[in-house]
Image (cartoon, rainbow, N blue to C red):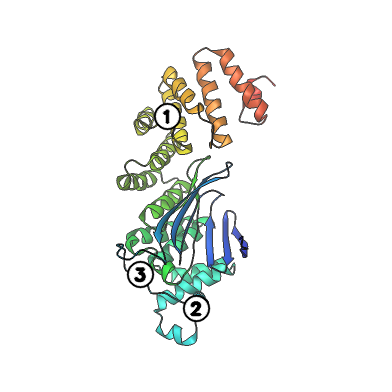
């Protein structure tokens, strides 16, 4: 039997929304794509590829109904649903002031009062959840220095992330762009905080700090293709045309197979790096491999691959093949990049 869900979505700033429902508020940051949710029914990650309608959901921890004997961390104290965002007088007397500020900040956020929400959260930054939420709110509203301060504080206290969200039954969801084609979730934990900090550093053009944050993340997840993709995109954005950077990007993509959209995007950056290094044949082979699989790949990513291959064909002197790729691109999207000009239209 189906069911209805009721919620109210309010825009706080470009790319920042709060979703108010019976289960509590959730903060969404960035374009549509991946979401992270933590609440009374456990933590789950939902990652999606924009434009495809596909999402991947992973349950990180189970809530009620865990099997007896299963190992787990001690459960946080539960708070009744009706007390999650509006505390009674006597409950406030027993609630630590910093947690009271956290709950008040969430309530103001749910009401769409972003400035008041940030003021409450800023008064409880030594609570990692308050620092994390304040950092995402500041990032979404373009207050980059404040976002850096809050997220850095959350990173220092990352071991306690999620406790207040769980205790008060509050759900939070967020998403961040990794490349033009891939969007991911900043998870309330060290990994999520580092991803968010990378975005803050990039917007401030603090390239070295952004690279350092990603390198720290890579030490946590050395085989993560997503982290490798993030690092490749950052390196090539900060130092376009740098041959040392290109060699590093090629090494990052070593052994990566075209298994999913994230891997396909990494192959695109590998091909771009190979082209800069003058290895056009290797770039062509990489792009041809990436273009073999179209299922579950964003259209924009496939167009970027075809455009890059056309550039490689031009450098190899294969004018006919280059024009064929440009014509296919023009037929699909007449306004894509400089395709019309290259075709003399």
Label 2's element?
A: helix
Disc 1 + disc 2, Cβ < 8 Å: no
The residue positioned 55% from the left and 67% from the top of the image is 109
Compared across the picture, whether 158 is left or right of 17 comes to left
Label 1's element?
A: helix
Q: Identify residue for label 3.
A: 75
Screen quadrant of the C terminus:
top right
Front: mark 1 or 2: 2
Quadrant for residue 295, please give it: top right
- Which residue extends farthest front? 1
Q: Identify residue for label 2.
A: 83
Observer-nearest residue: 5 or 155?
5
Label 3's element?
A: loop
Where 136 sits versus 167, above or below? above
- Any part of residue 16 in sight: yes
Front: mark 1 or 3: 3
Residue 264 drawn at (x, y percent): 47, 33
Residue 278 drawn at (x, y percent): 42, 19
Instruction: Give residue 172's mark.
Output: none
Observer-nearest residue: 257 or 150?
257
- Any part of residue 142 in sight: no
Neighbours of disc 3 within 10 Å: few (<14), some (14-19), many (20+) = few
The residue positioned 59% from the left and 67% from the top of the image is 112
Disc 3 + disc 2, Cβ < 8 Å: no
Point out the tag, 1 or 2, that comes first from the N-terminus: 2
Point out the tag, 1 or 3, that comes first from the N-terminus: 3
Q: Identify residue for label 1.
A: 270
Neighbours of disc 1 within 10 Å: few (<14), some (14-19), many (20+) = many
Residue 107 drawn at (x, y percent): 53, 72
Residue 113 drawn at (x, y percent): 58, 68
Point out the tag, 3 or 2, that comes first from the N-terminus: 3
């Amino acid at each position: 039997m189906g069911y209805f869900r009721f919620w109210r979505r309010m825009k706080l700033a470009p790319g920042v929304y709060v979703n108010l429902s019976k289960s509590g508020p959730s903060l969404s940051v960035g374009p549509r794509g991946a979401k992270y949710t933590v609440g009374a029914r456990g933590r789950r990650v939902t990652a999606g590829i924009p434009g495809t309608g596909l999402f991947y959901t992973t349950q990180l921890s189970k809530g009620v109904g865990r099997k007896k004997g299963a190992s787990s961390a001690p459960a946080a104290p539960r708070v009744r649903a009706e007390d999650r965002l509006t505390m009674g007088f006597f409950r406030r007397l027993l609630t630590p002031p910093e947690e009271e500020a956290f709950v008040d900040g969430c309530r103001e956020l749910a009401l769409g009062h972003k400035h008041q929400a940030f003021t409450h959260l800023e008064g409880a930054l030594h609570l990692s959840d308050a620092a994390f939420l304040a950092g995402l709110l500041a990032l979404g509203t373009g207050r980059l220095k404040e976002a850096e301060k809050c997220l850095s504080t959350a990173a220092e206290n990352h071991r306690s992330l999620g406790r207040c969200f769980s205790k008060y039954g509050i759900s939070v969801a967020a998403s961040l762009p990794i490349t033009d084609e891939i969007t991911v979730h900043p998870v309330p934990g060290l990994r999520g905080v580092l991803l968010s900090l990378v975005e803050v550093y990039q917007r401030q053009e603090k390239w070295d700090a952004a690279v350092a944050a990603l390198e720290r993340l890579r030490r946590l997840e050395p085989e993560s293709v997503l982290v490798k993709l993030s690092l490749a995109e950052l390196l090539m954005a900060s130092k376009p045309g740098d041959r040392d950077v290109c060699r590093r990007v090629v090494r990052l993509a070593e052994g990566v197979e075209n298994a999913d959209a994230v891997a396909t995007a990494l192959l695109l950056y590998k091909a771009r790096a190979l082209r800069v290094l003058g290895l056009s044949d290797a770039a062509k082979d990489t792009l041809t491999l990436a273009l073999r699989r179209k299922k579950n790949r964003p259209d924009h990513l496939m167009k970027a691959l075809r455009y890059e291959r056309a550039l490689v064909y031009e450098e190899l002197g294969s004018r006919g093949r280059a024009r064929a790729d440009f014509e296919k691109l023009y037929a699909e999207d007449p306004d894509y990049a400089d395709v019309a000009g290259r075709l003399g239209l």
